[in-house]
Amino acid sequence: MDYSLNIEMARRIAVKVAEAGGTVYYVGGMVRDRLMGNDSRTPDVDIEVHGIVPEKLEEILDTLGERQMFGASFGIYNLHHYDIDIAMPRKEKRTGEKHTDFRCEIDPFCGTCQAAARRDFTINSLMQNVLTDEIIDHYGGMDDLRNGIIRHVSTQTFPEDALRVLRAAQFAARFGFSIAPETIALCSGMSLNALAGERVLAEMKKALTKSIHPSIFFTQLRKMNHLHIWFPEIEALVNVPQSPIYHPEGDAWQHTMLTLDGAASLRTQATQPWPFMLSALLHDCGKAVTTAINANTGKISSIGHERAGVPLASTLMERLKTDKKTERYVLSMIRQHMKPNLLPAQNARIKSYMKMFDESEVPEDLLLLSKADRLGQLTDMNSYTDTENLLQSMMNHYRNVILKQKKVSGTDLLEAGFKPGKEIGELLSYAHKLWLSGISYENALNQTLQYGKKLHHSSD
């Protein structure tokens, strides 16, 4: 739905509500985004209707379209074919630890000050009259927006929703804002134990995919002492030493944060931006369990950290209820993240590059991750140009030569007289290696058949 059509419908609703003696306001993040010049990024429109009873609002909506309602106690409506959330002012009272444990009471006559008081942050408490464009600001949201500050509205109601801790960090990352010291202190005393993994994942995903510096999300959570519940695998990287020769930036935590921001600068080039960013976050989590310092030489190493990181990353993603497709992508990236930069340094043969690409879920994204990894080392990226050009030429060879070459198939082997079973699998594996080496189909088939005869003969 086009944003302008939703705005037009909001105005039509506001006119009819005004005729009935009420007022309609744009509310929440929509007002914030409008004032920041970001209002067209999403077609969603959020409005709140004051001064008329629910029955009158329903009557008005029925004259404008097909009304839908989401929970009678919440007083939230929309119109079919429009992206408009139409709400009535309500009071909320926490009744339990879960995110959904609230008792709501609709109160269309409570006034804008009380209605705005239930919002999380001052920049989200702003309201705007739909017909006059007047900004209603009861809690200093305009000043905080101008000064780039995330500040809670109410010390009493803010702690009722633990998700707000993550939202504070997420907004700080997305907008490049600072979090007010008193809000940091309030967040630090809140428990995140009862949150659902899916909701934690949703806030992290926004930070990773919408921020120029997503590292801010994690640095702010660290400042609030809130990494240990949901992100212990990332917190474990704090103070894990790295070789100053290869990592002048500092410990494994600092490297991960720099790599994450480097990945954000490459995010639009990735075929799958969200799992790409998650891979950047988790690529070195294995260093927490593999890093060692040689007692004699003082040399720091993290041998096998790419393999050790796989179960750690898997545990974190399971905790956050990440879907299996994303998990498969991320684990593939972690396993292989060292190879793109190692192979050129080792003067590896073409076959090694082809094998790397063949084993990767998304080879193009793997190369981007290797570049982000280098960005996280604070090294001169001009020196990386030759490596990047070599990797790209190998990728072109893989895409334009190897992938376009016909492969020996199981049907070929069956037609040659081989029986289904373990032997076929071994021969296909052999043929696959020939294919990666660039051997033509005819030659690969001939070599595979000859190899099969040797196997058959040796088994006799």
Image (tube, grey):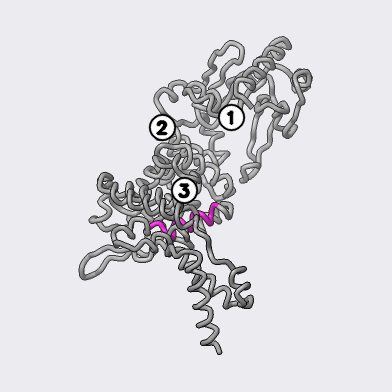
Residue 340 in the image, given as x and y percentages of width and height:
37, 56
Seen in the picture, residue 378 relative to 83 is either above or below; the reply is below
Q: Which quadrant is home to the N terminus?
A: top right
- Provide the residue designation for mark 2: 177
- The vertical placement of 165 against 91, above or below, is below
- Give the SS element for disc 2: loop
Quadrant of res 428? bottom right
Mark 1: few, some, or many residues within 10 Å (few <14, many ≥20)? some
Query: What kind of element bears circle 3?
Result: helix
Decide which of tag 1 and tag 3 comes sooner along the chain.
Answer: 1
**Is residue 219 visible to the viewer in this orientation of the structure?**
no
Q: Is residue 98 visible?
A: yes
Residue drawn at point x = 61 percent, y = 12 percent: 131
Is 69 situated left or right of 233 in this image?
Answer: right
Which residue type does callout 1 highlight? Arg
Q: Is residue 207 left or right of residue 297?
A: right
How far separated are the C-alphas under marks 2 and 3?
24 Å
Which SS does the magenta portion mostly show? helix
From the viewer's side, name the closer residue of 101 and 25: 25
Q: How far is mark 1 from mark 2, CA to CA? A: 22 Å
Crowd class of label 3 (few under 14; some 14 to 19; many from 20; radius 10 Å): many
Mark 1: which secondary structure?
loop
Circles 2, 3 touching at the beta carbon (< 8 Å): no
Q: Which residue shows up at 40% across the image and 56% down it?
A: 337
Residue 118 is tagged as: 1
The picture places residue 63, in percent across and down from the top left corner, at 78, 18
* Mark 1 and mark 3: Cα distance apart in space: 36 Å
| Closer to viewer: mark 1 or mark 2 | 2
Residue of label 3: 276
Q: Residue at x 53, y 55 (%)?
A: 327
Query: Which region shows up in magenta?
Result: 326-338
